[in-house]
Amino acid sequence: MDINKKIIMVLGSFFKRNKNKKEETVESHIEINTADCKGAECEKCVMACPNNVLIKQGDDTVVKNPRACKRCKVCEAICPNDCITVN
Ligand code: SF4
Ligand code: SF4
């Protein structure tokens, strides 16, 4: 996995709350297996999510707004490669 994919995965997966620094974060409950995800070639989950949680970012699909997720798991169901997990 190249460094850009690692960075995108980390940014998409974690928003940490650091009370000392007063930075707002939320740990994401949505994981995308970037090794199996077809990203821009697919985008089925991006189009299916009713809450615009998932977005296309370059050639990748990333979690943009985990707070908006209603845990409906439509994205899990539609992914042809079983690479989204909503916890
Ligand atoms: S569980 Fe539902 S709301 Fe959450 S990212 Fe998937 S499709 Fe969107
Ligand atoms: S549906 Fe699956 S393979 Fe397609 S972009 Fe979403 S996570 Fe990737």
Image: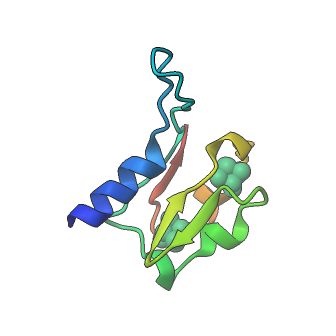
Would you say 3 lies left or right of 62 here? Answer: left
Would you say 5 lies left or right of 28 here? Answer: left
Q: Residue at x 45, y 45 (%)?
A: 13
76 is higher (above) or lower (below) than 20: below
User: Which quadrant would the C terminus be assigned to in this image?
Assistant: top right
63 is higher (above) or lower (below) than 60: above
58 is higher (above) or lower (below) than 70: below
User: Which quadrant would the N terminus be assigned to in this image?
Assistant: bottom left
Quadrant in which residue 33 is drawn: bottom left
Q: Give x and y (percent) for residue 83.
A: 44, 59
Q: Give x and y (percent) for residue 52.
A: 72, 60
17 is higher (above) or lower (below) than 48: above
Q: Give x and y (percent) for residue 28.
A: 53, 39
Spot the residue most to the top: 20
Kindly tell me whether residue 1 is visible in this rendering.
no
Q: How is the image coloured?
A: rainbow
Q: Residue at x 45, y 68 (%)?
A: 81
Spot the residue most to the front: 21
Q: Residue at x 71, y 68 (%)?
A: 48
Spot the residue most to the left: 2
Number of residue marks: 0
Spot the residue most to the right: 50
Kindly tell me whether residue 77 is visible in this rendering.
yes
Q: Give x and y (percent) for residue 6.
A: 28, 57
Front position in the image: 24 or 82: 24
Quadrant in which residue 9 is drawn: bottom left
Would you say 7 lies left or right of 71 here? Answer: left
